Image (cartoon, rainbow, N blue to C red):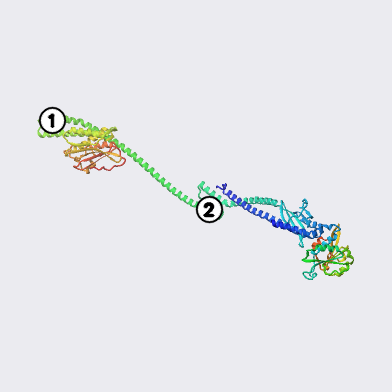
Amino acid sequence: MRTLPFRTLRAKLIAAMVVTTLTALLVAGIAVVAYDLRAYRFNTFADVETQAELLAGSTAAALNFDDAETANEGLGVLRFRPRVSAAAVYNARGKLFATYARQGTPPQFPELPGDEGVRIEGDQVHAFRRVVEQGEILGTVYVRRDYRLRERAFDYIGIVTTVAVLALAVAVLVSIWLQTVITRPVLSAARAAREVVTHGDYSARAQKFSDDEVGTLVDAFNEMLAVVEARTRDLERSNAELEREIGERRRMEEEMTQLNIDLERRVRERTSQLEMTNSELESFCYSVSHDLRAPLRAIDGFGQALAEELAGRLSGDAQRLFDRIRAATQRMGQLIEDLLNLSKVSRGALEYRDVDLSALAGQVVRELKMQDPDRRVDVSIWEGIKVNGDPRLLRAALENLLGNAWKFTGRTESARIEVGTMRDGDRSVYFVRDNGAGFDMAYADKLFGAFQRLHGMEEFPGTGIGLATVQRIVHRHGGRIWADAAPGRGAVFYFTLAPESEPVGRVASN
Amino acid sequence: MEILKSARAILCALVAATFFAVACALASADDAVGEYRVKAAFLFKFGGYVDWPAQAFADPDSPFVIGVVGAEQVADDLAGMIVGRTIGGRRIEIRRFQEHETPAGVHVLFVARAAAGSLAVVLETVANQPVLVVTETDDIASGAAINFVVVNNKVRFDVMLDSAEERNLKISARLLGVARNVVDGSS
């Protein structure tokens, strides 16, 4: 509120009432006082003129017959007119003929009669009137009368003030009653609203006291409350529903978590069992391989000694059988060697270092060329392939992969081997490509199994353990290995060295 | 306003000058010497307070006649007083009568003390006529309507209402108001 410094509705109502009443009183008071004072002036004039007229009539005879006594008696009647303070009759010569002065009023009269008419002098009205009879001026009547305009005005102001105060009091009382009538429903509605806000009790209803605008407001408010209540009920119901659903879901989640925990526990148990079994197996394998080497070496050694002893004395068939024994022995030795390698790859902790894969591949290729200096192979190794991994195992993997490539390009004109890398998303894929014998992709799933061979021993010698070893190394680095090939058109081996977040599809080859 | 005021002032002055004589007469009323002068003025003024019946005048233009018996002084004063004046719109005529004369056609008849002896006769001649008879005797039962008296050196008068009513005259209450005594024989 800018104009009215009242905070409450009731104060405003009372103020409005009081201001209205005061304004009405003031206007009415001013109008009444102004009218009355005007009427008073007019009446006073009329009265004094009438008085003078009457006196003129009644004293004419006295003047005519020079009867001052009668004239004085006539003027004496004025004592019944207490407003008249003095009166006098002058004869035709302007001499005082008869006088009258109200008791308590000093008998002062104008020395000579003045002009006819009424005039105001202070709080008195003076009137002169000629006494005329038969066209003759017999004298002059003088009447002086109280003219209490100011006192009257003050009286009125007092009366108006008193009335205003009384009316104000009544107005205040009436407005207090009225504001009760008006504000009670409003306050009731406000109380109901506060109730709703503080207690959240939407079933509360404002009481309706009247059929007026406030009543309409109260109705609207109650309707609104009803709607809110219904909505709240709906919300609460749906909330309960939701809560129930959430509870159910949580229970299910808990169950699932429990199941997972069980599952994980079982997986861990199984894994540890498996690991134990595996480790036992590996130990077994290693011991077997290791222990097998000594008798095999003995067989080979003694076989060689026997061959030297019997040199030139064996028949052709015997010599051939003998050679086959030795070849088988050597092959078995190679097998045992490879098995031991595979075991080694699987055992022991990884030692991660920064490894220059390009340099490593270069070393391996140089060794291959030294072992087989007659081969003409076009080897291309991309430069600067840096990886993080165990250098010993990575070297073993590259030896196997490049060894395979070297071996399977043995019958290929203008053999070519390539080592490189490519980006697949955010990880690096390394590859070793050759244009050798290749293989049928139908057997791709058997490629990395131990002792699995896709080519005849006569065609390409090998133990079938190499790729199993490579796969073991790649897996131990958390990577993956796969191949793409076609018979007679070469093969590509791809591998990664870091765990992948999601399965990666096959990388297209040439 | 100024013009009106001055006009009124001039009028006042004129009126005052015109009736100076009357004023002088009234002023000298206190004097025993001027007693008749005052009585003359009264006689003239009575005319304004008494109603005469219509048959008292022969026609609308008939004069108002004041008869004086046995008082030349009064008649002279009256003659000087009536100049330019009227009573009830009629011009005024003064008639002088001797004691033995029969005053006829008068409206006011003053019978002075000097003619008091013939009063009864005079009254006889105007019996039942609308004539205001004014005397200055001590006998209020003489049959006159108005009788002058001198009280404290001032001229006053008594009014005999029944005498006036006998002659069909109506005397104004205002005249009665200034009379010393009003005698009402009927009451």
Report the Cα–Cα distance between label 1 and label 2. 124 Å
Label 2 marks a residue whose chain is: A
Residue A58 image-quadrant placement: bottom right
Q: Which mark is residue B120?
A: none
Residue A452 vs residue B161, the one in the foreground = B161
Where does residue A510 sit, x and y in percent of width and height? 23, 43
Q: Which mark is residue A307?
A: 1
Residue A78 to residue A452: above or below: below
Q: Is residue A481 left or right of residue A213?
A: left
Residue A85 to residue A348: above or below: below
Q: Amino acid at mark 2?
A: Leu
Q: Can residue A62 be seen?
A: no
Q: Amino acid at mark 1?
A: Ala
Per the image, label 1 sits on a secondary structure element best described as: helix
Q: Which residue is mark 2?
A: A217
Residue at (78%, 65%) from the top-left corner?
B86
Residue A419 to residue B166: above or below: above
Residue A265 image-quadrant placement: top left
Residue at (21%, 40%) from the top-left corner?
A491
